[in-house]
Image: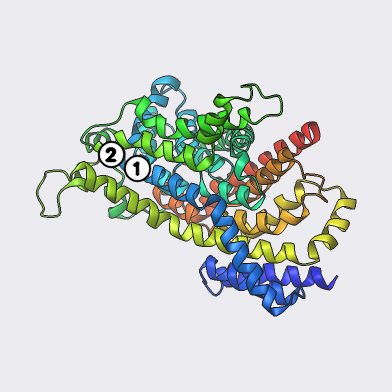
């Protein structure tokens, strides 16, 4: 029982440090790892060694994948690829179903792009569609936000699910994580879309600044601001190529050996390794670098001529590395925390008790939901929870590859439950949609609750049928 109290105290320390003390999650997790080591009875010398080895081990497995995935996201964000994908979806779905259209757009865009950035990029599209179709901006905002949110916590190469997969020793099974993530995230997006339909007649009740009104330009004006927009095939290639390669690599590694055991399997195993697949995704994104909003490509001298292709490429790579740096540090600190937990006896103690309760995938869901609701960051919730539960998957009856994948899904479901005032995404949605805080709690926060519950129920059903 003392071990459990120490563990609960350490979790409380993470929450207090990140919310009340405003400490960066990297430092909060690192301090938590050290405190947990001493509190759980590890020798002083072993605490530091275990933490540093855990830090290096997790980054050695997925660090390159996170950086490459973030670079792809930056290129897609800056090149207008998201705008092209939005155009394609609107042409396919049509303007008769505007909430469905923005939900699908958000669902696709958020696979490589952070949901906060995705919402800002697509806000003008959402506003333009709302005006043209006479649909409530509130319903459109919730549909877009929940579409973005569904894949953000469940489908790699978004960094959160990648980090959780790494903590659960699934780096070589990212194809399976992607496939199951798509299965689980679709009903979650559907739940958000259904909740959004309740607000079709409701108008925003919040105030909006003049600066925000100026930033919310017409979608047609946004398209015109690019030198040229990429083709649909070019826009989708950086997402589709790595996912396809990872999935082919996973299929080639199946015991049934569908591709035989010769050179083809070796080639697919190489190309399907996450780092190589994401590197191929970066290569597929290179043609997009010529597309850029004119305002962002003016030379530093103030002239209207665009930067060279090489300058744009260097800028995008630097932007991706900068954006991935805090994620890498948080992920590494989560690995240190998880390594300390695994080196102690608390895993055996919790495992022997949890296995008798039969709660399975609900345990990681509840832990992730508690951390998400308490401190606001989905990425921190995914990293910390996956590190915490990694030693327990065997006792939960989920020690197979598929079982561990479902644990990632359960953690991802908890990582979206719920988005409220301590979450940056909540404020992005609230401000850009012009909702009041009370209105946003009814619309956006309840929507994320329904998404999380839907995702964990789908995960539970999959666990019953497949594990």
* Percent coordinates x, y for residue 218 in the rendering: 28, 37
* Percent coordinates x, y for residue 262 in the rendering: 59, 24
> Which residue is at 37% across, 33% downward?
284
| Mark 1 residue crowding within 10 angstroms, few (<14) / some (14–19) / many (20+) | many
Give 209 or 298, whichever is nearer the viewer: 298
Which residue in the structure is indicated by mark 2? 289
Q: Quadrant of the C terminus?
A: top right
> Which residue is at 77% across, 76% downward?
41
**Numbered label attached to residue 75:** 1
Observer able to see residue 242? yes
Q: Earlier in the sequence, mark 1 or mark 2?
A: 1
> Which residue is at 56% across, 33% downward?
269
Q: Residue furthest front?
A: 262
Q: Which SS class for mark 1?
A: helix
- Classify 322 as above or below 115: below
Q: Which SS class for mark 2?
A: helix
Q: CA distance from mark 1 to mark 2?
A: 7 Å
Observer able to see residue 453? no
Q: Residue furthest right?
A: 356
Image-based side of 10 in relation to 435, left or right: right
Image-based side of 161 in relation to 85, left or right: right
Give 410 or 466, whichever is nearer the viewer: 466
Give 456 or 385, whichever is nearer the viewer: 385
| Mark 2 residue crowding within 10 angstroms, few (<14) / some (14–19) / many (20+) | many
Q: Quadrant of the N terminus?
A: bottom right
Q: Residue furthest bottom?
A: 44
Marks 1 and 2 close (CB-CB < 8 Å): yes
Image-based side of 384 in relation to 149, left or right: right
> Which residue is at 51% across, 68% downward?
24
Q: Quadrant of residue 122?
A: top left
């Amino acid at each position: 029982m003392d071990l459990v109290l120490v563990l609960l105290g350490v979790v409380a320390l993470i929450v207090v440090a990140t919310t009340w003390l405003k400490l960066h999650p990297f430092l909060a997790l690192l301090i938590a790892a050290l405190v947990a080591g001493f509190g759980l009875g590890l020798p002083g010398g072993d605490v530091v060694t275990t933490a540093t080895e855990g830090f290096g081990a997790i980054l050695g497995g997925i660090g390159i994948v996170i950086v490459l995935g973030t670079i792809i996201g930056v290129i897609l964000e800056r090149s207008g690829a998201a705008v092209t994908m939005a155009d394609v979806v609107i042409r396919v779905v049509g303007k008769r179903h505007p909430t469905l259209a923005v939900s699908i757009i958000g669902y696709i865009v958020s696979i490589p792009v952070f949901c906060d950035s995705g919402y800002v990029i697509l806000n003008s599209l959402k506003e333009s569609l709302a005006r043209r179709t006479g649909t409530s901006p509130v319903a459109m905002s919730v549909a877009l936000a929940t579409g973005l949110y569904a894949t953000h916590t469940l489908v790699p190469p978004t960094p959160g699910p990648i980090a959780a997969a790494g903590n659960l020793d699934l780096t070589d099974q990212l194809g399976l994580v992607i496939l199951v993530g798509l299965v689980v995230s679709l009903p979650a997006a559907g739940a958000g879309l259904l909740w959004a339909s309740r607000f079709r007649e409701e108008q925003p009740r919040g105030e909006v600044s003049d600066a925000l009104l100026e930033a919310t330009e017409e979608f047609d004006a946004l398209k015109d601001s690019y030198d040229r927009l990429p083709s649909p095939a070019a826009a989708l290639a950086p997402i589709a190529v790595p996912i396809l390669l990872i999935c082919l690599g996973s299929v080639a590694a199946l015991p049934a050996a569908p591709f035989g055991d010769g050179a083809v399997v070796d080639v697919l195993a190489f190309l399907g390794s996450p780092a190589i697949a994401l590197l191929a995704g970066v290569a597929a994104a290179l043609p997009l670098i010529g597309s850029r909003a004119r305002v962002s490509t003016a030379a530093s001298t103030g002239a209207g001529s665009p930067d060279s292709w090489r300058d744009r490429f260097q800028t995008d790579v630097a932007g991706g590395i900068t954006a991935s740096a805090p994620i890498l540090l948080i992920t590494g600190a989560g690995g240190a925390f998880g390594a300390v937990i695994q080196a102690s006896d608390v895993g055996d103690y919790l495992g022997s008790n949890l296995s008798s309760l039969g709660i399975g995938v609900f345990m990681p869901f509840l832990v992730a939901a508690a951390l998400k609701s308490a401190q606001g960051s989905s990425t921190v919730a995914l990293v910390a929870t996956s590190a915490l539960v990694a030693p327990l998957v065997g006792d939960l009856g989920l020690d197979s590859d598929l079982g561990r994948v479902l644990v990632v899904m359960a953690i991802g479901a908890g990582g979206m439950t719920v988005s409220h005032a301590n979450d940056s995404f909540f404020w992005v949605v609230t401000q850009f949609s012009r909702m009041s805080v009370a209105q946003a709690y009814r619309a956006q926060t309840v929507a994320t609750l329904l998404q999380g519950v839907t995702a964990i129920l789908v995960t539970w059903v999959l666990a019953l049928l497949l594990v």
